Amino acid sequence: MTSFTVRLESFDGPLDLLLTLIKDQQLDIATVPLASMAEQYLAYVRAMESRELEVAAEYLVIAATLLFLKSKALLPPIPQEFQDETAETPEQVEEHLRRRLIAYSKYREFGEQLRERQSEAGAFFYRESGDPAGDVVQRYDIDAQKLKSAFIAMLRQARPEKRSIARERVSLIASMDYIMRRIKERNEVKFSELCEELGMTRDVIVVTFLAILELIRRRRIAFEQTDAFDDIRLFAAKAAAA
């Protein structure tokens, strides 16, 4: 007797389960006798019941259909005089289920293609060019490894600092005030210039960048970055709207 390994995965419905069982055996849904899938299908339903999981009625309907097809395949045909002419024949029942399965297979394939496109689109970052009033959108392909390399390269430019436990020396509020003062004095300032003026340590780089983000969030300053990973130009928010 053939044994089956049942994996309690989540399926989108009974057709999804039946299609998965067929695909796992590398069978053709257009030709496979659906009655042959009854035992594996029932094994999955019994496993769900043994785990006290709720079995939807749709699963039981498909299970009953497969059992019907299997019983008709094993039993001798009913004599003509005892047949119900109004009832569907096993062949009609199987064909109806097969058509539903083929249609669902196409929908599932389309769904997988859409998920792939969504995943591909998620690898891009869309942002404004720096002018809040503009409608220009820049599209960057996000490569995690390149982002990592760029951040490490920036940290390597920082001056070596002694490793010691001490109170925080860089204040976020103080950095925000410093940035605003420099913008008022010069009308605009670059991110790299701020880091150099404040000491170019790792703490300074991180806190200065956080201060810039907070000022942008509060709409006190605006920014412009011509290309990806270029220096960031900062200026007053009112100047951006002018």
Image (cartoon, helix red, strand yellow):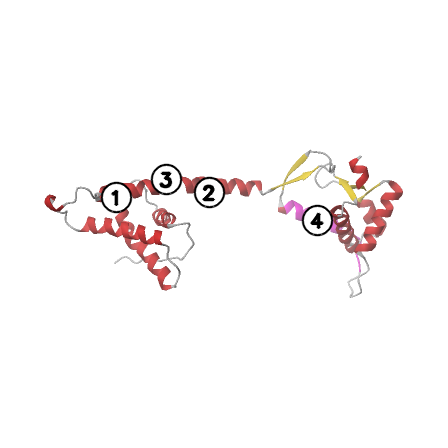
Q: Which residue is mark 1?
A: 93
* Dot 1 or dot 3, earlier in sequence: 1
Q: Which residue is mark 2?
A: 112
Type of amino acid at the residue the image marks with label 1: Val
Q: Confirm whether residue 4 shows in the render.
A: no
Q: Which mark is residue 145?
A: none
For this rendering, which residue is in front, 151 or 62?
62
The x and y percentages for residue 194 are: 82, 47
Label 2 environment density (alpha carbons within 10 Å; few <14, some 14–19, many ≥20): few
Between disc 3 and disc 2, the foreground one is: 3
Between disc 1 and disc 4, the foreground one is: 1
Residues rendered magenta in the picture: 145-161
Give the residue displayed 50% in from the left and 43% down from the top: 115
Residue 39: quadrant of the picture: bottom left
Q: Confirm whether residue 215 shows in the render.
A: yes
Q: CA distance from mark 4 to mark 2?
A: 34 Å
Compared to residue 241, the image places residue 150 above or below, namely below
For this rendering, which residue is in front, 242 or 113?
242
Between disc 1 and disc 2, the foreground one is: 1
Tag 4–tag 2 contact (CB < 8 Å): no
